[in-house]
Image (cartoon, helix red, strand yellow):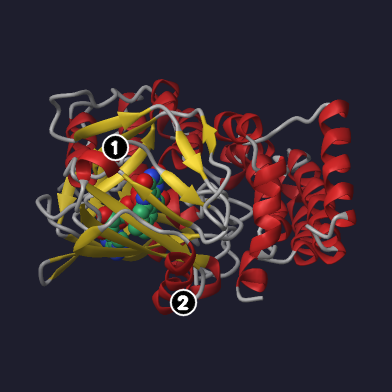
Amino acid sequence: MQKSYDVIVIGAGTAGSYFAKLMAEQGYSVLVVEKSSREKLGRRLDIFHLDRDRLPRFGIPAPAPGDDDYVSEFEYSISKSAFDQYPKRTLYPFLVLRLPQFLARLARWAESFGVEYAFETEFLDFIYEGGRICGAQLKQGEETVQVFSRLVADASGIVSVGRRKLPEDYGVETFEIGPRDKFYVILRYARLKHPEVDRVKCTVNWPYYKTWIGPQHDKDGAIIGVGANFSYEYAEEVFQKFIKQVKLPPHELQYIQKGTTPYRRPPYSFVADGFVVLGDAACLTKPYSGEGITSAWELCAIAAQEFGAAMKEGRYPEAARVWKTNVRYQRGQGAKFAYIMATLVGAVNTLPEENDYQFRTGIVFNEKDMTTMNRNFGVTLGLGDIMAMVFKIVAGVLTRNITLATVKALLRSVTAAGKIQKHYEKFPEEISAFKAWCREADKLWAAAGSMADVAKS
Ligand SMILES: Cc1cc2nc3c(=O)[nH]c(=O)nc-3n(C[C@H](O)[C@H](O)[C@H](O)COP(=O)(O)OP(=O)(O)OC[C@H]3O[C@@H](n4cnc5c(N)ncnc54)[C@H](O)[C@@H]3O)c2cc1C
Protein backbone atom coordinates (compact mmCIF):
# COMPACT_ATOMS: atom_id res chain seq x y z
CA MET A 1 0.00 0.00 0.00
CA GLN A 2 1.38 3.41 -0.97
CA LYS A 3 0.98 6.65 0.97
CA SER A 4 -1.28 8.22 -1.64
CA TYR A 5 -3.60 7.32 -4.53
CA ASP A 6 -5.94 9.26 -6.76
CA VAL A 7 -8.92 7.27 -5.47
CA ILE A 8 -9.69 5.23 -2.35
CA VAL A 9 -12.75 2.97 -2.58
CA ILE A 10 -14.25 1.61 0.64
CA GLY A 11 -15.56 -1.93 0.08
CA ALA A 12 -14.84 -4.67 -2.48
CA GLY A 13 -18.50 -5.50 -3.16
CA THR A 14 -20.08 -5.33 -6.61
CA ALA A 15 -20.30 -1.50 -6.52
CA GLY A 16 -16.79 -0.88 -5.16
CA SER A 17 -14.91 -3.20 -7.53
CA TYR A 18 -16.85 -1.98 -10.58
CA PHE A 19 -16.24 1.72 -9.81
CA ALA A 20 -12.56 0.99 -9.04
CA LYS A 21 -12.13 -0.69 -12.41
CA LEU A 22 -13.76 2.24 -14.24
CA MET A 23 -11.46 4.76 -12.58
CA ALA A 24 -8.30 2.68 -13.08
CA GLU A 25 -9.19 2.24 -16.74
CA GLN A 26 -8.97 6.03 -17.10
CA GLY A 27 -5.42 5.99 -15.76
CA TYR A 28 -6.08 6.84 -12.08
CA SER A 29 -4.33 5.02 -9.26
CA VAL A 30 -6.99 3.24 -7.19
CA LEU A 31 -6.88 1.51 -3.80
CA VAL A 32 -9.83 -0.62 -2.65
CA VAL A 33 -9.90 -1.16 1.11
CA GLU A 34 -11.91 -4.14 2.29
CA LYS A 35 -12.30 -5.21 5.90
CA SER A 36 -12.89 -8.86 5.05
CA SER A 37 -10.12 -11.21 3.90
CA ARG A 38 -9.88 -12.10 0.20
CA GLU A 39 -10.98 -15.68 1.04
CA LYS A 40 -14.04 -14.60 3.02
CA LEU A 41 -15.25 -11.92 0.59
CA GLY A 42 -18.98 -12.33 -0.17
CA ARG A 43 -19.40 -15.42 2.01
CA ARG A 44 -22.55 -13.87 3.53
CA LEU A 45 -24.59 -15.07 0.55
CA ASP A 46 -24.09 -18.24 -1.49
CA ILE A 47 -26.38 -17.52 -4.42
CA PHE A 48 -27.75 -14.40 -6.09
CA HIS A 49 -29.62 -13.59 -9.29
CA LEU A 50 -28.24 -11.09 -11.80
CA ASP A 51 -30.14 -9.47 -14.70
CA ARG A 52 -28.39 -11.07 -17.63
CA ASP A 53 -29.38 -8.49 -20.26
CA ARG A 54 -27.97 -5.54 -18.31
CA LEU A 55 -24.38 -6.86 -18.27
CA PRO A 56 -23.41 -5.61 -21.78
CA ARG A 57 -24.58 -2.09 -20.79
CA PHE A 58 -21.84 -2.04 -18.15
CA GLY A 59 -19.22 -3.92 -20.16
CA ILE A 60 -19.07 -6.71 -17.61
CA PRO A 61 -18.08 -10.09 -19.07
CA ALA A 62 -21.03 -12.45 -18.43
CA PRO A 63 -20.32 -15.62 -16.47
CA ALA A 64 -20.90 -18.67 -18.67
CA PRO A 65 -21.33 -22.42 -18.14
CA GLY A 66 -18.05 -23.86 -16.87
CA ASP A 67 -17.07 -20.67 -14.92
CA ASP A 68 -16.81 -21.20 -11.16
CA ASP A 69 -19.40 -18.48 -10.41
CA TYR A 70 -21.98 -19.76 -12.93
CA VAL A 71 -24.83 -22.00 -11.72
CA SER A 72 -27.65 -21.69 -14.27
CA GLU A 73 -29.94 -19.16 -15.96
CA PHE A 74 -33.64 -18.79 -16.64
CA GLU A 75 -35.59 -16.80 -19.21
CA TYR A 76 -38.68 -15.79 -17.22
CA SER A 77 -40.08 -15.58 -13.68
CA ILE A 78 -43.60 -16.31 -12.50
CA SER A 79 -45.74 -14.25 -10.10
CA LYS A 80 -48.83 -15.55 -8.32
CA SER A 81 -51.66 -14.09 -6.28
CA ALA A 82 -52.08 -14.15 -2.49
CA PHE A 83 -54.15 -17.34 -2.92
CA ASP A 84 -51.53 -18.92 -5.18
CA GLN A 85 -53.58 -18.40 -8.33
CA TYR A 86 -53.38 -16.76 -11.79
CA PRO A 87 -49.66 -17.27 -12.60
CA LYS A 88 -48.20 -14.44 -14.71
CA ARG A 89 -44.91 -14.69 -16.57
CA THR A 90 -42.33 -11.88 -16.60
CA LEU A 91 -40.14 -12.36 -19.65
CA TYR A 92 -36.83 -11.18 -18.23
CA PRO A 93 -33.75 -13.41 -18.01
CA PHE A 94 -31.62 -13.92 -14.91
CA LEU A 95 -28.28 -15.60 -14.26
CA VAL A 96 -28.05 -17.69 -11.09
CA LEU A 97 -24.54 -17.09 -9.70
CA ARG A 98 -22.35 -17.78 -6.67
CA LEU A 99 -21.57 -14.48 -4.92
CA PRO A 100 -18.08 -15.19 -3.45
CA GLN A 101 -16.83 -16.48 -6.81
CA PHE A 102 -18.42 -13.57 -8.70
CA LEU A 103 -16.80 -11.01 -6.36
CA ALA A 104 -13.44 -12.74 -6.79
CA ARG A 105 -13.92 -12.52 -10.58
CA LEU A 106 -14.72 -8.77 -10.36
CA ALA A 107 -11.66 -8.16 -8.17
CA ARG A 108 -9.37 -10.03 -10.60
CA TRP A 109 -10.90 -8.03 -13.47
CA ALA A 110 -10.30 -4.72 -11.63
CA GLU A 111 -6.74 -5.81 -10.76
CA SER A 112 -6.05 -6.46 -14.45
CA PHE A 113 -6.65 -2.69 -14.95
CA GLY A 114 -4.20 -1.84 -12.16
CA VAL A 115 -6.54 -1.55 -9.13
CA GLU A 116 -4.80 -2.39 -5.85
CA TYR A 117 -6.68 -4.20 -3.07
CA ALA A 118 -5.94 -3.96 0.65
CA PHE A 119 -7.90 -6.78 2.32
CA GLU A 120 -8.38 -7.02 6.07
CA THR A 121 -8.13 -3.25 6.09
CA GLU A 122 -10.88 -1.15 7.65
CA PHE A 123 -11.90 2.41 6.88
CA LEU A 124 -12.05 4.39 10.13
CA ASP A 125 -12.50 8.03 9.16
CA PHE A 126 -11.66 10.69 6.58
CA ILE A 127 -8.65 12.96 6.62
CA TYR A 128 -9.40 16.63 5.87
CA GLU A 129 -7.30 19.52 4.63
CA GLY A 130 -8.84 22.97 4.65
CA GLY A 131 -12.21 21.35 5.49
CA ARG A 132 -12.11 19.11 2.39
CA ILE A 133 -11.65 15.34 2.24
CA CYS A 134 -8.11 14.42 1.23
CA GLY A 135 -7.81 10.77 2.23
CA ALA A 136 -8.71 8.16 4.82
CA GLN A 137 -7.56 6.73 8.11
CA LEU A 138 -7.34 2.98 7.81
CA LYS A 139 -6.86 0.15 10.29
CA GLN A 140 -4.61 -2.76 9.28
CA GLY A 141 -4.23 -5.26 12.10
CA GLU A 142 -3.32 -3.20 15.14
CA GLU A 143 -1.94 -0.35 13.06
CA THR A 144 -3.71 2.85 12.03
CA VAL A 145 -2.40 4.35 8.80
CA GLN A 146 -3.19 7.50 6.85
CA VAL A 147 -3.55 7.24 3.09
CA PHE A 148 -4.08 10.38 0.99
CA SER A 149 -6.32 10.66 -2.08
CA ARG A 150 -8.27 13.18 -4.10
CA LEU A 151 -11.44 11.07 -3.95
CA VAL A 152 -12.91 8.65 -1.40
CA ALA A 153 -15.80 6.51 -2.70
CA ASP A 154 -18.05 4.94 -0.09
CA ALA A 155 -19.17 1.52 -1.38
CA SER A 156 -19.29 -0.07 2.08
CA GLY A 157 -22.81 -1.47 1.71
CA ILE A 158 -25.81 -0.87 3.98
CA VAL A 159 -23.58 0.14 6.93
CA SER A 160 -22.54 3.22 4.89
CA VAL A 161 -19.41 3.78 7.00
CA GLY A 162 -18.10 6.67 4.92
CA ARG A 163 -21.34 8.55 4.29
CA ARG A 164 -22.31 8.33 7.96
CA LYS A 165 -18.95 9.73 9.11
CA LEU A 166 -19.33 12.89 7.02
CA PRO A 167 -19.89 16.20 8.84
CA GLU A 168 -23.65 17.00 8.79
CA ASP A 169 -23.18 19.95 6.45
CA TYR A 170 -20.68 18.34 4.06
CA GLY A 171 -23.24 17.96 1.27
CA VAL A 172 -24.44 14.32 1.41
CA GLU A 173 -27.06 13.15 3.93
CA THR A 174 -25.68 11.08 6.80
CA PHE A 175 -28.83 9.10 7.76
CA GLU A 176 -28.61 5.58 9.15
CA ILE A 177 -30.49 2.93 7.16
CA GLY A 178 -32.63 1.77 10.10
CA PRO A 179 -35.27 -0.97 10.55
CA ARG A 180 -38.04 1.00 8.80
CA ASP A 181 -35.74 1.72 5.87
CA LYS A 182 -34.58 -1.77 5.04
CA PHE A 183 -35.85 -5.22 4.24
CA TYR A 184 -34.85 -8.12 6.46
CA VAL A 185 -34.38 -11.04 4.09
CA ILE A 186 -34.40 -14.68 5.22
CA LEU A 187 -33.30 -17.32 2.72
CA ARG A 188 -34.04 -20.97 3.41
CA TYR A 189 -31.87 -23.30 1.36
CA ALA A 190 -33.89 -26.49 0.99
CA ARG A 191 -33.61 -29.91 -0.66
CA LEU A 192 -36.71 -31.00 -2.57
CA LYS A 193 -38.14 -34.38 -1.61
CA HIS A 194 -39.39 -35.06 -5.15
CA PRO A 195 -37.05 -33.10 -7.45
CA GLU A 196 -38.12 -35.01 -10.53
CA VAL A 197 -41.62 -33.49 -10.27
CA ASP A 198 -40.98 -30.28 -8.34
CA ARG A 199 -37.64 -29.09 -9.83
CA VAL A 200 -37.31 -25.29 -9.49
CA LYS A 201 -36.11 -23.90 -12.82
CA CYS A 202 -37.06 -20.24 -12.44
CA THR A 203 -38.15 -17.90 -9.68
CA VAL A 204 -41.79 -18.00 -8.61
CA ASN A 205 -42.83 -15.12 -6.40
CA TRP A 206 -45.87 -14.05 -4.42
CA PRO A 207 -45.73 -10.21 -4.27
CA TYR A 208 -48.47 -10.06 -1.63
CA TYR A 209 -46.15 -11.69 0.96
CA LYS A 210 -42.85 -10.63 -0.67
CA THR A 211 -41.89 -14.30 -0.77
CA TRP A 212 -40.35 -16.40 -3.52
CA ILE A 213 -38.86 -19.75 -4.41
CA GLY A 214 -35.92 -19.91 -6.80
CA PRO A 215 -33.12 -22.16 -8.04
CA GLN A 216 -29.85 -22.67 -6.11
CA HIS A 217 -26.52 -24.47 -6.71
CA ASP A 218 -27.96 -27.90 -5.84
CA LYS A 219 -30.24 -28.63 -8.80
CA ASP A 220 -32.43 -30.79 -6.54
CA GLY A 221 -32.75 -27.89 -4.16
CA ALA A 222 -34.38 -24.46 -3.92
CA ILE A 223 -34.10 -21.16 -2.08
CA ILE A 224 -37.27 -20.07 -0.31
CA GLY A 225 -37.09 -16.38 0.51
CA VAL A 226 -39.04 -13.72 2.39
CA GLY A 227 -38.33 -10.02 2.91
CA ALA A 228 -40.04 -7.55 5.27
CA ASN A 229 -39.44 -4.26 7.05
CA PHE A 230 -38.71 -3.92 10.80
CA SER A 231 -37.01 -7.21 11.84
CA TYR A 232 -36.24 -10.84 11.04
CA GLU A 233 -38.96 -11.80 13.53
CA TYR A 234 -41.54 -9.84 11.55
CA ALA A 235 -40.29 -11.37 8.28
CA GLU A 236 -40.76 -14.80 9.89
CA GLU A 237 -44.35 -13.87 10.92
CA VAL A 238 -45.12 -12.95 7.30
CA PHE A 239 -43.55 -16.22 6.15
CA GLN A 240 -45.80 -18.21 8.50
CA LYS A 241 -48.88 -16.47 7.03
CA PHE A 242 -47.58 -17.31 3.55
CA ILE A 243 -47.12 -21.03 4.17
CA LYS A 244 -50.64 -21.25 5.62
CA GLN A 245 -51.97 -20.07 2.27
CA VAL A 246 -49.50 -21.47 -0.27
CA LYS A 247 -48.45 -25.10 -0.46
CA LEU A 248 -44.72 -25.31 -1.18
CA PRO A 249 -43.24 -28.50 -2.67
CA PRO A 250 -42.22 -31.00 0.06
CA HIS A 251 -38.64 -30.23 1.14
CA GLU A 252 -36.05 -30.52 3.90
CA LEU A 253 -34.31 -27.44 5.25
CA GLN A 254 -30.54 -27.43 4.57
CA TYR A 255 -29.53 -24.09 6.14
CA ILE A 256 -30.58 -20.44 6.47
CA GLN A 257 -28.85 -17.23 5.36
CA LYS A 258 -30.02 -13.76 6.39
CA GLY A 259 -29.23 -10.23 5.35
CA THR A 260 -30.68 -6.76 4.96
CA THR A 261 -31.21 -4.64 1.87
CA PRO A 262 -32.00 -0.88 1.78
CA TYR A 263 -35.57 0.18 1.10
CA ARG A 264 -35.80 3.97 1.24
CA ARG A 265 -35.19 6.92 -1.02
CA PRO A 266 -31.50 7.48 -1.79
CA PRO A 267 -29.71 10.62 -0.55
CA TYR A 268 -30.63 13.61 -2.70
CA SER A 269 -26.96 14.22 -3.53
CA PHE A 270 -24.38 11.45 -4.02
CA VAL A 271 -21.39 13.76 -4.30
CA ALA A 272 -19.49 16.25 -2.17
CA ASP A 273 -15.92 17.63 -2.23
CA GLY A 274 -13.67 14.61 -2.88
CA PHE A 275 -16.48 12.18 -2.07
CA VAL A 276 -19.05 9.94 -3.76
CA VAL A 277 -21.44 7.34 -2.30
CA LEU A 278 -22.35 4.23 -4.31
CA GLY A 279 -24.25 0.93 -4.06
CA ASP A 280 -26.25 -0.05 -0.97
CA ALA A 281 -24.63 2.82 0.95
CA ALA A 282 -26.58 5.05 -1.49
CA CYS A 283 -29.81 2.93 -1.29
CA LEU A 284 -29.85 2.07 -4.98
CA THR A 285 -31.86 -1.16 -4.82
CA LYS A 286 -34.73 -1.70 -7.26
CA PRO A 287 -37.88 -0.68 -5.39
CA TYR A 288 -39.97 -3.59 -6.68
CA SER A 289 -37.54 -6.41 -5.90
CA GLY A 290 -34.76 -5.28 -3.53
CA GLU A 291 -32.10 -6.43 -6.02
CA GLY A 292 -29.29 -3.92 -5.93
CA ILE A 293 -26.38 -4.99 -8.07
CA THR A 294 -27.05 -3.82 -11.62
CA SER A 295 -29.11 -0.81 -10.50
CA ALA A 296 -26.09 0.40 -8.50
CA TRP A 297 -23.78 0.03 -11.49
CA GLU A 298 -25.84 2.73 -13.25
CA LEU A 299 -24.62 5.36 -10.77
CA CYS A 300 -21.08 3.88 -10.75
CA ALA A 301 -20.88 4.32 -14.53
CA ILE A 302 -22.12 7.93 -14.43
CA ALA A 303 -19.92 8.87 -11.45
CA ALA A 304 -16.81 7.34 -13.06
CA GLN A 305 -17.34 9.47 -16.18
CA GLU A 306 -17.95 12.68 -14.24
CA PHE A 307 -15.15 12.20 -11.66
CA GLY A 308 -12.82 10.89 -14.37
CA ALA A 309 -13.29 14.09 -16.35
CA ALA A 310 -13.14 16.39 -13.30
CA MET A 311 -9.90 14.89 -11.93
CA LYS A 312 -7.84 15.27 -15.12
CA GLU A 313 -4.45 17.02 -14.81
CA GLY A 314 -4.34 16.51 -11.06
CA ARG A 315 -7.46 18.59 -10.34
CA TYR A 316 -9.44 18.12 -7.12
CA PRO A 317 -13.07 16.93 -7.64
CA GLU A 318 -15.07 19.64 -5.88
CA ALA A 319 -18.81 19.07 -5.56
CA ALA A 320 -19.64 21.70 -8.20
CA ARG A 321 -17.31 20.05 -10.76
CA VAL A 322 -18.97 16.63 -10.41
CA TRP A 323 -22.53 17.86 -9.84
CA LYS A 324 -23.63 16.38 -13.15
CA THR A 325 -23.38 12.95 -11.52
CA ASN A 326 -26.50 13.87 -9.52
CA VAL A 327 -28.25 15.54 -12.45
CA ARG A 328 -27.77 12.57 -14.79
CA TYR A 329 -28.67 9.89 -12.24
CA GLN A 330 -31.62 11.64 -10.55
CA ARG A 331 -33.24 12.73 -13.82
CA GLY A 332 -32.91 9.20 -15.24
CA GLN A 333 -33.05 6.04 -13.13
CA GLY A 334 -33.53 8.11 -9.96
CA ALA A 335 -36.81 9.61 -11.21
CA LYS A 336 -38.10 6.20 -12.33
CA PHE A 337 -37.22 4.50 -9.05
CA ALA A 338 -38.76 7.37 -7.07
CA TYR A 339 -42.02 6.90 -9.01
CA ILE A 340 -42.08 3.14 -8.38
CA MET A 341 -41.21 3.50 -4.70
CA ALA A 342 -44.00 6.03 -4.08
CA THR A 343 -46.56 4.04 -6.11
CA LEU A 344 -45.85 0.81 -4.27
CA VAL A 345 -46.91 2.37 -0.96
CA GLY A 346 -50.52 2.32 -2.24
CA ALA A 347 -50.25 -0.68 -4.55
CA VAL A 348 -49.20 -3.17 -1.85
CA ASN A 349 -51.72 -1.95 0.70
CA THR A 350 -54.46 -4.42 -0.23
CA LEU A 351 -56.38 -7.31 1.27
CA PRO A 352 -55.46 -10.81 0.00
CA GLU A 353 -58.84 -10.99 -1.81
CA GLU A 354 -58.07 -7.72 -3.59
CA ASN A 355 -54.63 -8.94 -4.59
CA ASP A 356 -56.27 -12.08 -5.99
CA TYR A 357 -58.70 -9.91 -8.00
CA GLN A 358 -55.80 -7.77 -9.29
CA PHE A 359 -54.07 -10.91 -10.57
CA ARG A 360 -57.30 -12.31 -12.06
CA THR A 361 -58.07 -9.15 -14.00
CA GLY A 362 -54.48 -8.02 -14.68
CA ILE A 363 -54.69 -4.72 -12.75
CA VAL A 364 -51.02 -3.95 -11.92
CA PHE A 365 -50.12 -7.67 -12.21
CA ASN A 366 -50.13 -8.52 -15.90
CA GLU A 367 -47.44 -10.05 -18.08
CA LYS A 368 -46.93 -7.11 -20.43
CA ASP A 369 -46.51 -4.45 -17.72
CA MET A 370 -44.37 -6.65 -15.47
CA THR A 371 -42.02 -7.45 -18.34
CA THR A 372 -41.80 -3.78 -19.37
CA MET A 373 -41.21 -2.73 -15.75
CA ASN A 374 -38.22 -5.07 -15.46
CA ARG A 375 -36.77 -3.93 -18.77
CA ASN A 376 -37.37 -0.16 -18.57
CA PHE A 377 -38.13 0.52 -14.87
CA GLY A 378 -41.39 2.06 -15.98
CA VAL A 379 -44.56 1.40 -17.87
CA THR A 380 -46.03 3.84 -20.37
CA LEU A 381 -49.77 3.37 -20.54
CA GLY A 382 -51.68 4.39 -23.65
CA LEU A 383 -55.20 5.80 -23.45
CA GLY A 384 -56.66 2.34 -24.25
CA ASP A 385 -54.65 0.75 -21.39
CA ILE A 386 -55.79 3.45 -18.95
CA MET A 387 -59.46 3.06 -19.98
CA ALA A 388 -59.22 -0.74 -19.60
CA MET A 389 -57.66 -0.37 -16.15
CA VAL A 390 -60.28 2.17 -15.00
CA PHE A 391 -63.02 -0.19 -16.25
CA LYS A 392 -61.57 -3.12 -14.28
CA ILE A 393 -61.21 -1.02 -11.12
CA VAL A 394 -64.80 0.30 -11.37
CA ALA A 395 -66.05 -3.25 -12.01
CA GLY A 396 -63.99 -4.42 -9.01
CA VAL A 397 -65.61 -1.81 -6.74
CA LEU A 398 -69.14 -2.54 -8.02
CA THR A 399 -68.69 -6.29 -7.53
CA ARG A 400 -67.07 -5.66 -4.11
CA ASN A 401 -63.79 -7.24 -5.13
CA ILE A 402 -61.96 -4.01 -4.32
CA THR A 403 -62.84 -1.56 -1.56
CA LEU A 404 -63.13 2.15 -2.21
CA ALA A 405 -60.48 2.71 0.45
CA THR A 406 -57.99 0.66 -1.59
CA VAL A 407 -58.82 2.57 -4.78
CA LYS A 408 -58.36 5.88 -2.95
CA ALA A 409 -55.01 4.75 -1.50
CA LEU A 410 -53.83 3.65 -4.94
CA LEU A 411 -54.93 6.91 -6.56
CA ARG A 412 -53.28 8.92 -3.80
CA SER A 413 -49.98 7.11 -4.22
CA VAL A 414 -50.04 7.28 -8.02
CA THR A 415 -50.70 11.03 -7.84
CA ALA A 416 -47.93 11.57 -5.28
CA ALA A 417 -45.58 9.39 -7.34
CA GLY A 418 -46.27 11.35 -10.52
CA LYS A 419 -45.37 14.61 -8.75
CA ILE A 420 -42.18 13.10 -7.29
CA GLN A 421 -41.07 11.77 -10.67
CA LYS A 422 -41.58 15.18 -12.31
CA HIS A 423 -39.65 16.84 -9.49
CA TYR A 424 -36.70 14.43 -9.94
CA GLU A 425 -36.77 15.02 -13.69
CA LYS A 426 -36.18 18.69 -12.87
CA PHE A 427 -33.20 18.01 -10.60
CA PRO A 428 -31.27 21.32 -10.57
CA GLU A 429 -28.40 21.82 -13.02
CA GLU A 430 -26.80 24.21 -10.54
CA ILE A 431 -25.77 23.38 -6.99
CA SER A 432 -27.11 26.80 -5.90
CA ALA A 433 -30.70 25.66 -6.53
CA PHE A 434 -30.26 22.38 -4.64
CA LYS A 435 -31.51 23.45 -1.18
CA ALA A 436 -34.84 24.69 -2.53
CA TRP A 437 -35.20 21.49 -4.59
CA CYS A 438 -34.61 19.38 -1.43
CA ARG A 439 -37.25 21.29 0.56
CA GLU A 440 -39.86 20.55 -2.11
CA ALA A 441 -38.72 16.91 -2.40
CA ASP A 442 -39.08 16.48 1.38
CA LYS A 443 -42.70 17.68 1.19
CA LEU A 444 -43.50 15.33 -1.70
CA TRP A 445 -42.00 12.28 0.04
CA ALA A 446 -43.87 13.12 3.25
CA ALA A 447 -47.13 13.17 1.26
CA ALA A 448 -46.30 9.80 -0.37
CA GLY A 449 -45.67 7.96 2.94
CA SER A 450 -43.52 4.85 3.14
CA MET A 451 -43.77 1.09 2.76
CA ALA A 452 -43.09 0.71 6.49
CA ASP A 453 -46.22 2.80 7.25
CA VAL A 454 -48.47 0.30 5.47
CA ALA A 455 -46.51 -2.92 6.14
CA LYS A 456 -48.28 -3.82 9.37
CA SER A 457 -51.69 -2.36 8.54
C1 LIG B 1 -30.37 -11.93 1.37
C2 LIG B 1 -30.12 -11.01 0.23
C3 LIG B 1 -30.26 -11.47 -1.08
C4 LIG B 1 -30.00 -10.61 -2.17
N1 LIG B 1 -30.13 -11.09 -3.44
C5 LIG B 1 -29.85 -10.28 -4.49
C6 LIG B 1 -29.95 -10.77 -5.82
O1 LIG B 1 -30.27 -11.93 -6.04
N2 LIG B 1 -29.65 -9.90 -6.85
C7 LIG B 1 -29.29 -8.60 -6.63
O2 LIG B 1 -29.03 -7.85 -7.58
N3 LIG B 1 -29.22 -8.12 -5.37
C8 LIG B 1 -29.47 -8.92 -4.30
N4 LIG B 1 -29.38 -8.43 -3.02
C9 LIG B 1 -28.93 -7.05 -2.83
C10 LIG B 1 -27.40 -7.03 -3.06
O3 LIG B 1 -26.78 -8.03 -2.29
C11 LIG B 1 -26.83 -5.66 -2.70
O4 LIG B 1 -27.60 -4.64 -3.28
C12 LIG B 1 -25.37 -5.54 -3.19
O5 LIG B 1 -24.60 -6.63 -2.78
C13 LIG B 1 -24.77 -4.24 -2.68
O6 LIG B 1 -23.45 -4.16 -3.14
P1 LIG B 1 -22.46 -3.10 -2.50
O7 LIG B 1 -21.18 -3.28 -3.25
O8 LIG B 1 -23.09 -1.77 -2.45
O9 LIG B 1 -22.29 -3.54 -0.97
P2 LIG B 1 -21.78 -4.88 -0.32
O10 LIG B 1 -21.92 -6.06 -1.21
O11 LIG B 1 -22.41 -4.95 1.03
O12 LIG B 1 -20.20 -4.65 -0.14
C14 LIG B 1 -19.70 -3.74 0.79
C15 LIG B 1 -18.31 -4.19 1.21
O13 LIG B 1 -17.76 -3.19 2.07
C16 LIG B 1 -17.05 -3.83 3.11
N5 LIG B 1 -16.96 -2.92 4.25
C17 LIG B 1 -17.96 -2.54 5.10
N6 LIG B 1 -17.48 -1.72 6.05
C18 LIG B 1 -16.16 -1.53 5.77
C19 LIG B 1 -15.11 -0.78 6.39
N7 LIG B 1 -15.30 -0.03 7.50
N8 LIG B 1 -13.89 -0.81 5.83
C20 LIG B 1 -13.62 -1.57 4.70
N9 LIG B 1 -14.58 -2.32 4.11
C21 LIG B 1 -15.82 -2.30 4.62
C22 LIG B 1 -17.85 -5.08 3.39
O14 LIG B 1 -17.07 -6.06 4.03
C23 LIG B 1 -18.32 -5.49 2.00
O15 LIG B 1 -17.45 -6.42 1.40
C24 LIG B 1 -29.63 -9.26 -1.92
C25 LIG B 1 -29.52 -8.79 -0.61
C26 LIG B 1 -29.74 -9.66 0.44
C27 LIG B 1 -29.58 -9.14 1.86
Q: Amino acid at mark 1?
A: Val
Q: Looking at mark 2, is its residue's CB closer than 8 Å to ligand 1? A: no
> Split into 4 quadrants, where in the image is the C terminus?
bottom right
Q: Is residue 382 above or below residue 35?
A: above
Left of 208 or right of it: where is 98? Answer: left
- Asked where in the image residue 347 lies, by quadrant, the reply is bottom right
x then y, percent, for residue 150: 39, 45
How many residues crowd mark 1 within 10 Å: few (<14), some (14–19), many (20+)? many
Residue at 36% in and 24% down: 26
22 sits to left or right of 386: left
Which label's residue is closer to the chain start, 2 or 1? Answer: 1
Q: Is residue 19 visible to the viewer in this orientation of the structure?
A: no
Specify the farthest residue to the bottom. Answer: 233
Q: Secondary structure at mark 2?
A: helix
Q: Are marks 2 and 1 in contact (CB under 8 Å)?
A: no
Please give the name of the residue rendered at 71% of the width and 46% of the height, measured from the top-left corner: 339
Q: Give amino acid for label 2.
A: Tyr
Q: In percent of the image, x 82 and y 39: which residue is there?
A: 389
Whole-percent x and y of residue 209?
A: 52, 61
Q: Position of residue 225 (x, y in %)?
A: 37, 58
Which residue is nearer to you in this view: 57 or 268?
Answer: 57
Depth check: 92 or 123 in front?
92
Q: In the image, which disc is placed on residue 96?
A: 1
Report the number of numbered marks.
2
Label drawn at residue 430: none
Whether residue 301 can be seen here: yes
From the top left corner, tell me how far across and down residue 106 is, in percent. Answer: 24, 35
**Quarter of the image holding residue 162?**
bottom left
Q: Secondary structure at mark 1?
A: strand
Q: CA distance from mark 2 to mark 1?
A: 28 Å
The tag on residue 234 is: 2
